[in-house]
Image (cartoon, coloured by chain):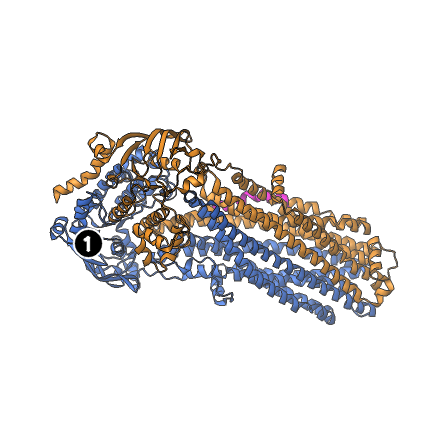
Amino acid sequence: MFDRLHTIWTLLEGQRLRYAGALLSLIVASMLLYAVPIVPQVVLDAVLTDDVREGSLPERVGLWALGGRAFLAENLWVAALAVIGLTTLAAIATYFRGRWVAIAAESVVCRLRDRLHNHLNQLPCRWYDQAETGDILQRCTSDVDTLRNFLAMQVIEIGRAIAMMIIPLPIMLLMDVRMTLASVVVLPLIIGSAVYFFGRVKSVFREKDEAEGRLTACVNENLTGIRVVRAFARQEFECDKFQERNDEHRRLDYRLYAILSWFWSASDELCFLQKALVFILGGYWVAVGTLEIGTYYFFIAAVSMYVWPVRMMGRLLAELGKAIVAVDRIHEILDSPVEQVTGVLSPPSVQHPGLIEFHDVDFAHGETPVVHNMNFRINAGSTLAIVGPSGSGKSTLINLLLRFYDTDAGTIVVDGVDIKSLDRQEHRRRMAVVMQDPFLYSRSIHDNIALSRRTASDEEVHVATRVACIHDSILEFEEGYETVVGERGLTLSGGQRQRVAIARALLQQPDILVLDDALSAVDTRTERFILEAMRDRHGRQTTIVIAHRLSTLTAADDIIVLDEGRIIQQGTHESLVTEEGMYRRLWDIQTTIESTEEGAA
Amino acid sequence: MSQSPFIQEEEYAGGKFNWGLWRRILRHARPHRIWFWTMVCSGLVLAGVETMLPISNAWLIDEAVAGRTDAAFMWYAALYVILVTIFSALVWLFIRAAGHLSTAVAYDLRAKGFGRLQELPFSFYDTRPTGWLVSRLTSDCTKISSLLPWFLLDLSWGSSFLVGISIAMFILDWQLALWVLVIVPPLSLVSWYFQRKLLRSSRLVRRTNSIITGVYNEGLMGVRTTRALSREEESLAEFQVQSGDLKRYTIRNSLQSAVYLPCIISLGAVGVGMALWKGGLQLQEGSSLSLGDLIAFMQFAVLFSMPIQEIAARITDLQAAQAAAERIQSLIDTVPEIRDTPDVVEAIRRAPAGGPEDGGRSDITTIEFKHVDFWYKPAEPVLLDFNMRVEEGQTIALVGATGGGKTTIASLAARFYEPKRGDILLDGVEYRHRSLHWYQSQLGVVLQTPHLFSGTIRDNIRYGRLDATDLDVERAATMVNAHQFIQGHDGGYEAEVGEGGIRLSVGQRQLIALARAVLADPQIFIMDEATSSVDTETEQLIQAAIDTVLKGRIAFVIAHRLSTIRAANVILVIDDGRIVEQGTHSELLSAKGHYWRLYTRQEAEEAEASLGS
């Protein structure tokens, strides 16, 4: 608990003065607010009744400040002015409290958001492998919001309740000890019951959240699979399934409201009983003549001022745990170590095709070995094709080359330098990768392509899109190159996305180009066209191609065949088809269909 | 194809209060009108109780000032306790009522919305992302339904409390009442002014907040792309623009509240001051006003701002939720374009038990497209005067370039869309004269990207026929060569496939989708052959499975594989919404036209087992 509060304290760095200022304004405002009912008290006692008693210290000060009994009796407007003036001053202090807290809390939260974003950009890929996108997203949004609520509102509400409860105590004690006791005796019960209650119903709230999650998941799944639902005319079945979730959600909702109705009505009753106690006991003492009417008024006014904030505090105290959990969850991200800087060297040769060597490379995902003792070399400017069944380690080789992961053993050397000693970003800048399911940012198509080379002219972008056979499709969109794609825009088909990504890679004019099954959703004619265009760049860039369709790989300078993380065959297409082995087998399967067709045709 | 206006998260009808819309929303509360009136009545009674509290205070104070602790004193004390107990009981009641009303309305809205979504045509889904639709049924419904009861309560409580206080004050002393009421116009004005400002700034906050969530999401989805492009710094800089905006807007919003509340407090103090000054003067002059009355006036002056604040806040809430209300209401109001005609509904009602639900013929032996025109946008027709006839046992392969209309033909055949002009006939009967549910139950559709539901493999196959036995399920799996891999899979048929089938490979998902379709044993089979690459051996299994599935049915296949195409009875080469060639594989080859060109180009250059896309 204490170290969590310390964590929150460190977050406040740079804004602590504002918080202190807010705290001060809060205290000032509370004091002024309690000074307000002293004015009517003085008027009631000194002017409107013929009470000759001395009065308590606060009352005498008040009377003196208002100009004395005689003056006040002649000029009652002074009292009105005092009430308005004191309240306005309190209001101004309240404004500053709000202002400073808002600026402080938002600055802290803004900095935290930036930190999170920055940190996420630097966490290693291994971290992402075991993390869930939805969960991270929730930590970055709703947990940050919880913390924001805590910093911007709850802290201050709790502070206000405490100030409102403590500040009148000395004044009340000076006025009348019996009445003070009567004014606070129920408070512990109010706070205690709220803390206890909200601690107990946490589980109901959680159950309801979970039911809501299941309901959302149900709708989500139905809508993503809506075509399947229709295809099998399963609407009724789906409605039944949904109704089950909807019923469950409704049941928990009713239950929660039922519980809350008991709490709020009971705590209202408690608060009112606290007021009634002051009111009736005070009335009795006034009647028997041991309490001045003005003092009585003060107590009635004061108890109304603090009883509601105090009740709220009980709830806030019970919910304090939420903020602490949120801080923990956020810090689980921030405390995860970032990708280590292992090298700072710049790549020795840029704007030249890279010479790539894998020396005895081993790599495992956790306990599962993925790549064993991998040795191969890609000459500068040549094309290497990698073939193998799913899970044979093809993409892992690419991830290692890009330094998304570092090798467990062995080295990867590019242009004679171990890539571990290179600056990661500069190393990656030499390469362009197109993946099977490429990612496009939610911005215009033009921007998506030009991301790889900011300085590129429109003409250069168009050259790249023509080579990638996507130029014409883009022009068919209503807004052409300015069409926004991705999450908040137009959804492109898999093949379109692949081609946009290829254009992006081509525009970059990389030293090393990697196509990781990047043409799988592109039709054969287009694929052939793109590959031909790539061939023109032969010698100017080193190319690595991964594909399932062997026919696309026949022109590669070198082919390696992987199985279970090992190279089982290597050679050119011509040599591999004549060799007994997996390549021949795959080739045969793929051409069987062909040959039966020839026979039939 | 353009970006849809519907996906703008924050659309507001200019801030104008749309009474008609809210009246329609209120209509959803009609089945729960007991709770509706409970809320309204609670508000009324509550206002009465709260008006009485300061008055009972005043009576007791006057007793006390007079130095009496007699029966009357006791009675006033008891009255106070009774009043607050009624108050608490009302609190209990209206929280219950609010719970029932909001939960029940949310339940209905969700159920209606969900039911409607099951009926709406795909053209509706084409323009709206799934996530957007999901939030309509979740956050929008919750937002509106939770607002409703509090709006009722605060409106009835607030307005009657204002009236109650005013009447009480006028009865006590009408002149003093006027003095205190001086603060009402400025209070209302200030509340109205600030609520408007708050409404605007909080919209900005929400919009920016959702953008930030989007940016985080994009960062997570594209983490590798960002790294591969080495644009970490750039992406942070872009993020900082957004987070800076959010900070600015939130502070602006908070500062507006920071001004608003002090203004209300100060105005309340003006009321108290007025009561103290003018009331004090009257007391000094020895009028009928009592000390207790004066104290009651001061309490009323403080209380006055509460209902005004609350009413203003609730109206703002409604305005803020107006967009949500519009979206959900318009979803519920959308009439599905494709549904049974009144005649068909009537036929279903009158149909005898057994056989198709509309009483029509139960088997389908031919499908005929007659002079069919179709377009998604009027300016861009996809099909024009399209004619085609398919008979039982025939497989039709649709071949041709992307955008030529192959998918459209399949969708029309499935009645996912209906022709804009022309007819599609089932054994001579226009399919719009048959029951939609019956017809679609006769279909087996396998999509290019197979979608599985979370649940076990068995559940997913059984989706094809809900009453199938375990044995049926396994038989279907065996037919499409999926049995072997399922048994080898960890957990076998009971293995969870994960959301959307994520735990299975694409090839495995395709096999399961095929098994599902086989189990349904449809009369018409519609398939969009997958193009995404799977490894060679799985590919072989899938091809064999497809051959099995197509046998003996009417089948439409958007074909990419030569083996499928070759096995088809008729190949339709589609280009620009027309059949440019038609015939069997060998006929088309000897015709040396489009098909021959497509085919030989591949043969000659690559010996590639794939055609078209």
The hue in which chain B appears in the rendered picture of the protein: blue
Residue B69 location, x and y as percent?
A: 80, 57
What kind of residue is marked 1? Val
Q: Residues within 10 Å of mark 1 (few under 14, many from 20)?
A: many
Q: Which residues are magenta?
A: A194-212
Residue B47 location, x and y as percent?
A: 64, 62
Task: Residue A119: tell me if it is visible.
Answer: yes
The hue in which chain A appears in the rendered picture of the protein: orange
| Quadrant of res B501 | top left
Residue A587 location, x and y as percent?
A: 22, 36
The residue shown at (78%, 51%) is: A172
| Quadrant of res B8 | bottom left
The residue shown at (67%, 63%) is: B304
Q: Which residue is mark 1?
A: B573
| Side of A173 relative to A25 (left or right) | right
Q: Give yes or no for residue A14 being in the magenta stretch.
A: no
